[in-house]
Amino acid sequence: MLRDVVEARPLGGYRVYVRFDDGIDGEVDLARLITFEGVFAPLRALDRFAELRVAPDLGTICWPNGADVAPETLYDAVLQGHSPTRAAG
């Protein structure tokens, strides 16, 4: 089942906190998931990277230049991380 990102915020460097519609949340180091080439090249600059936002219509994070990361990639990364949690309520 595909899960949507409902909250995201930069944490410093290329790390991002993400929370999904099923309550699973955690940190993802996007430097391990993306190559800063093509549409991602401008995001090498941390100030540009920090412009990330949730795109509700896509169910994932995106940036003003049109770059986005598939929500299933983020979900898998959170599950493989050290301590994903399930938010209460």
Image: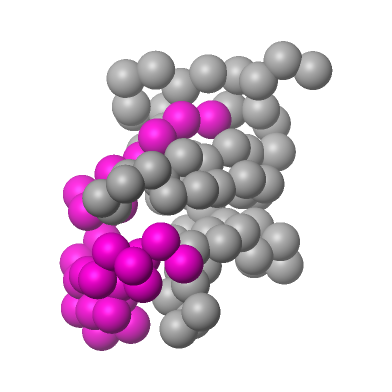
The quarter of the displayed image where residue 56 is located = bottom right
Q: Where does the C terminus fall, quadrant-wise?
A: top right
Residue 60 x %, y %? 57, 57
Q: Residue furthest right?
A: 89
Which of 76 and 7 lies nearest the eye of the viewer?
Answer: 7
Q: Is residue 86 left or right of residue 35?
A: right
Indicate yes or no whether the magenta region holds residue 44: yes
Q: Where does the N terminus fall, quadrant-wise?
A: top right
The quarter of the displayed image where residue 40 is located = bottom left
The quarter of the displayed image where residue 42 is located = bottom left
Region of the chain picked out in magenta, as a range: 25-51
Eyeballing the image, is 59 above or below 66? Answer: above
Residue 9 x %, y %? 50, 48
x 58%, y 28%: residue? 24
Eyeballing the image, is 12 above or below 68? Answer: above
Q: How many marks?
A: 0
Residue 34 x %, y %? 26, 61
Q: Is residue 82 left or right of residue 55?
A: left
Residue 14 visible in the snapshot: yes
Indicate yes or no whether the magenta region holds residue 3: no
Residue 1 visible in the snapshot: no
x 46%, y 67%: residue? 51
x 48%, y 63%: residue? 52
x 32%, y 20%: residue? 82
